[in-house]
Image: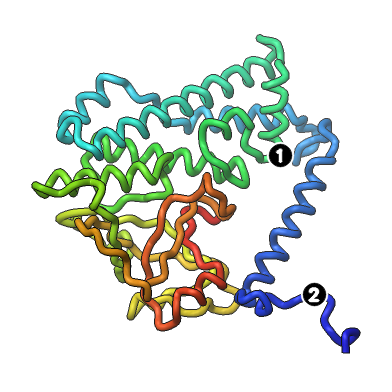
Amino acid sequence: FITNMPLQDIPEVFGLHSNADISYQINTAKGILDQILNVQPKESTGGKQGDTREAVVGRIAEDMLRKLPRDYVPHEVKEALVRLGGMLPMNIFLRQEIDRMQKILTLVRRTLTDLKMALEGTIVMSDDLKQTLDNMFDARVPENWKKISWRSTTLGFWYTELLERDGQFKRWCFHGRPKVFWITGFFNPQGFLTAMRQEVTRAHKGWALDSVICQNLVTRFSKEDIHDSPPEGVYVHGLFLEGASLDRKTGKLVESRPKVLYEQMPVIYIYAINTTAGKDSKLYECPIYRKPARTELNYIGSIDFESDIGPRHWVMRGVALLCDIK
């Protein structure tokens, strides 16, 4: 009997969906490829014949510098925030996000400029610049950039996210508050939700922040369908559902579709209410994480979902919302 048992347990034994086996195989293959990349010789040539590592990285640095957004001018930001209403909770949050983005822009611009000069022989190639060169050639994010920003699988994904984050901040600051917020583009999403709670609390006389909690409504709309801001609270987009699927007609959780690991969520309306009562035990409190790695540092908050199946089932399935699946 024992010899007839499979060598590897199927995901269903642990209460997981069969798609979990696909995730396992992807992660295993990625780990092997990363190890192969790590042991590659550092003096190999580039893609075109005659191209050295230095030439390839030099072109990459030149292209990144050309596309890098311009710095934020402090007095322009200050004047724009005054036009948005001054020292309101959401404006304070925006200012903090802009300050962090400016630190990244300054570091990236300085690193790329120094790297170009080192490649030209104008300055000495330091150990940090040599490490940056190696990382850029391997399409990885340099460690000193990663420390003050966010994690990403490749340099291309990281830089694209940099441009998208900066675009959201500049539109919000200089062209008015967005109707729908891209929650993935924030350094501190918890601070964003707290600022929203403070905003709603101030709008209602007699409300105390300690008794104001977030509630949510899963809409059927995409971000292009939203043309007006909600009277209270915020619309957010950019979340992905892992471990389950969403019935768009009823807004309830259902089992994952075969071979579909992630499902993009529609716009979610998040608002705040004043209550001391607990949440409905029939709702599944779905955790939100910044990245697929489900650690405490990546945890943001939770979204409540309705379902015809008890919450315990979705806990076993490991259902969660992710801001980024890369």
Sooner in the amino-acid sequence: mark 2 or mark 1: 2
Instruction: Name the residue at 52% across, 31% down.
Output: 148
Residue sitting nearer the eye, 251 or 35: 251
Q: Residue 151 at x, y = what percent?
A: 57, 42
| Residue located at (69% from left, 32% from top) | 56
Q: Is residue 326 visible?
A: no
Task: Give percent across and percent down for residue 212.
Answer: 24, 52
Q: Identify the mark at residue 138; answer none if there is no mark.
A: 1
Q: How is the image coloured?
A: rainbow
**What's the residue at 62%, 73% (across, down)?**
19
Neighbour tally class for label 2: few under 14, some 14-19, many 20 plus, Cα within 10 Å: few
Is the residue marked by circle 1 packed among few (<14), some (14-19), or many (20+) residues within 10 Å?
some
Amino acid type indicated by mark 1 = Asp
User: Compared to 65, does 273 lie above or below?
Assistant: below
User: Residue beneath label 2, please?
Assistant: 8
The reply to whether residue 308 is visible in this rendering is yes
Describe the element under mark 2 as helix, strand or loop: loop
Q: Secondary structure at mark 1?
A: loop
- Compared to residue 133, the image places residue 37 above or below, namely below
The amino acid on which the numbered mark 2 sits, given as a three-letter code, is: Gln
Rendered image quadrant of residue 79: top left
Q: Viewed as shown, does residue 151 lie left or right of 2? A: left
Q: Nearer the viewer, residue 2 or 176?
A: 2
Separation of residues labelled 2 and 1 (CA atoms): 34 Å
Q: Quadrant of the N terminus?
A: bottom right
Asked whether 210 or 309 is in front, the reply is 210
Query: Along the horizontal axis of the image, is 207 left or right of 76?
Result: left
Say left or right for 293 vs 131. left
Residue lying at the far bottom in this picture: please name it: 1
Q: Where does residue 13 sit, x and y in percent of width and height? A: 68, 79
**Picture coordinates of residue 138, whole percent (x, y):** 71, 39
Q: Which mark is residue 225?
A: none
